[in-house]
Amino acid sequence: MRPQTPETGRANGVPVPQLATLRKRAGLSQRALAERARVSRHTISRLEQGAIARYTTIALLAETLHVTPSRLIQPPRRVQTEAAPNQPSVSGGP
């Protein structure tokens, strides 16, 4: 597959929505992860805020966190919440 470039109007990476969760689970600060993955702390911060990660950066982060690249780019699981039971209306009378 050909890499996508800005000239073609397509992104050359993807968001990494699981990064903060996996970093915290590993007990790492942004700085520690950045140093181990050989990227800047600013990069980690931007990615955790939703910026697009290059595929090479995803590979470095995945290796550092001991996960697959696909694990980093998975959307977060949605937590189902129970619907609140219908509350009876209270009517005031004369």
Image: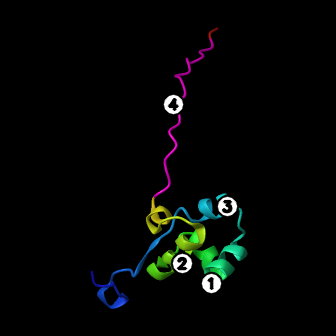
How is the structure coloured here?
rainbow
Which element carries disc 2, helix, strand or loop?
helix
Separation (CA) of disc 2 from disc 3? 17 Å
Residue at screen point 33% across, 91% down: 7
CA distance separating discs 1 and 2: 8 Å
| Residue 41 to residue 80: above or below | below
- The rendered magenta stretch, by its main secondary structure, is classed as loop
Question: Mark 3 against mark 4, which lies toward the viewer?
Answer: 3
Magenta range = 75-92
Q: Are marks 4 and 1 in contact (CB under 8 Å)?
A: no
- In the picture of the structure, the residue carrying the numbered disc 1 is 38
Which numbered disc flags the more N-terminal residue, 3 or 1? 3
Mark 1: give few (<14), some (14-19) or many (20+) Cα within 10 Å: few
Gap between marks 3 and 1 measured at Cα:
18 Å
Sequence-first disc among 4 and 2: 2
Q: Is residue 23 above or below residue 8?
A: above
Name the residue furthest top.
94
Answer yes or no: is residue 32 visible: yes
Residue beneath label 3, please?
24
Name which of mark 2 and mark 3 comes first in the sequence.
3
